[in-house]
Image: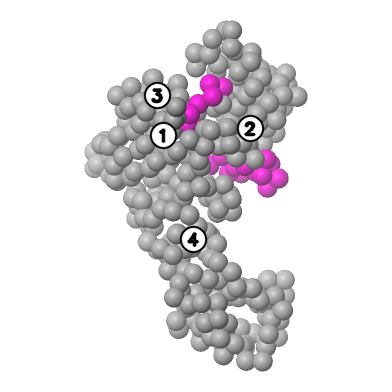
């Protein structure tokens, strides 16, 4: 039997205040079981508002939300039994209680039966690699451990949908990588994940589908190549020049900058340059154009590759502001 789609949000609109400020306008999203759908956009774009509507914490002004085939607007309490929500942060747990006791409290709130309670808690703690810390008081947890405990709480009922709003913000890089592993394991188990993040490498690594939101509306959607294509970028060339070659670096910026986007910045005593080429140019075209500017100089670290998500996103920045 085919599992129902984890999330279908259609034409969501949310207004706030007497002025009817439109925070989200005509946003549609779909999250399939076992897939990670990332929602990417600047602060104030409507990401958190969208997540909160999908989590039944905010009622849409108009539009519909279906969680595991359940109408989440008309039946929010029923829909909540099929989703997990992680907003993150240090709050949300009783510091003097152990991780196990905290999860026991939330298991009771979520209606986990007494017969299944112990097994559900043990399973959730093992999933986020906290089984050895089950009886440690939460006030003794690091921030990374606390964030993983948030994930464990969301997994208590083995939901079909997991909503993650900035789950790795403020974490040390090594801890953030562990949280990413946990998110990947959730998806591998068949859970559909809606993820918001400001980390481009995180989104690029995890997401099966990326939706870019700006000023409350979806601007484009697809994989990294699709986002780059929408931004008008095909390939990126990066290289560096010695500090004494500042004149050549400036020439690159001036001559190439007439037709292409060129970024220059100091880096470890050298000039680091990046050239963003339009989709219409092949690698040979890029190489020929660049050689005309550099002349006999051949940087040893010159690399031409497909544009990254971060580069594509930066090229879209002006289209995302309100």
Mark 1 secondary-structure assignment: loop
| Viewer-proximal residue among 304 and 169 | 304
In terms of sequence position, does the residue under pointer 4 or pointer 1 come before the other?
1
Q: Is 275 included in the stretch rendered in magenta?
A: no
Q: Position of residue 118 (x, y in %)?
A: 64, 13
**Span shown in magenta:** 156-180
- In three-dimensional space, the C-alpha distance between marks 4 and 2, rounded to whole angstroms, equals 31 Å
Which residue is depicted at the point 68% across and 26% down? 126
Residue 149: horizontal and vertical position, in percent? 62, 28
Q: Residue furthest left?
A: 19
Q: Which residue is mark 4?
A: 225
Mark 1 vs mark 2: give the one in front. Answer: 1
Mark closest to the chain's N terminus, 3 or 2? 3
Q: Position of residue 141 (x, y in %)?
A: 70, 29
- The answer to whether one can see residue 89 in this image is no
Q: Which mark is residue 106?
A: none
Q: Is residue 176 magenta?
A: yes
Residue at x 60% of width, y 73% of height: 304
- Crowd band around label 1 with a 10 angstrom C-alpha radius: few (<14), some (14–19), many (20+): some
Identify the residue position indicated by label 2 in the image: 148
Q: Earlier in the sequence, mark 4 or mark 3?
A: 3
**Which numbered disc, 4 or 2, marks the residue that appears first in the sequence?**
2
Q: Disc 4 or disc 2, which is closer to the eye? A: 4
CB contact under 8 Å: marks 4 and 1? no
Label 1 vs 3, first from the N-terminus: 1
Q: Residues within 10 Å of mark 4 (few under 14, many from 20)?
A: some
Instruction: Identify the disc placed on residue 79.
Output: 3
Q: Is residue 130 left or right of residue 52?
A: right
**Image quadrant where residue 177 sits:** top right
Q: Would you name the residue on which mark 1 appears?
A: 5
Callout 3: 10 Å neighbours few (<14), some, many (20+)? Answer: many
């Amino acid at each position: 039997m085919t599992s129902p789609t984890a999330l279908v949000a259609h034409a969501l609109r949310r207004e706030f205040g007497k002025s009817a400020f439109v925070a989200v306008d005509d946003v549609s999203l779909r999250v399939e079981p076992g897939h990670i759908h990332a929602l990417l956009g600047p602060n104030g774009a409507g990401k958190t508002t969208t997540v909160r509507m999908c989590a039944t914490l905010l009622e849409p002004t108009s539009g519909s939300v279906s969680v595991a085939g359940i109408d989440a607007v008309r039946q929010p309490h029923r829909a909540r039994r099929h989703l997990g929500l992680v907003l993150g942060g240090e709050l949300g747990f009783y510091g003097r209680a152990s991780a196990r006791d905290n999860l026991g409290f939330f298991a009771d709130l979520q209606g986990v039966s007494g017969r299944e309670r112990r097994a559900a808690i043990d399973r959730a703690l093992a999933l986020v690699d906290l089984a050895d810390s089950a009886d440690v008081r939460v006030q003794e947890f690091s921030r990374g451990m606390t964030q993983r405990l948030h994930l464990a709480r969301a997994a208590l009922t083995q939901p079909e949908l997991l909503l993650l709003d900035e789950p790795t913000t403020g974490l040390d890089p090594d801890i953030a990588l562990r949280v990413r592993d946990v998110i990947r394991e959730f998806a591998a188990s068949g859970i559909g994940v809606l993820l918001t993040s400001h980390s481009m490498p995180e989104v690029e690594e995890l997401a099966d589908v990326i939706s870019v939101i700006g000023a409350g509306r979806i601007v484009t959607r697809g994989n990294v190549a699709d986002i780059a294509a929408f931004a008008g970028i095909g390939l990126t060339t990066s290289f560096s020049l010695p500090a004494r070659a500042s004149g050549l670096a400036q020439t690159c910026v001036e001559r190439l900058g007439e037709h292409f986007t060129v970024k220059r910045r100091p880096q470890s005593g050298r000039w680091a340059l990046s050239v963003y080429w339009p989709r219409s140019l092949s690698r040979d075209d890029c190489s020929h154009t660049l050689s005309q500017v550099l002349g006999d100089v051949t940087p040893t670290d010159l690399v031409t590759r497909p544009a990254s998500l971060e580069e594509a996103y930066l090229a879209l920045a002006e289209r995302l502001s309100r």
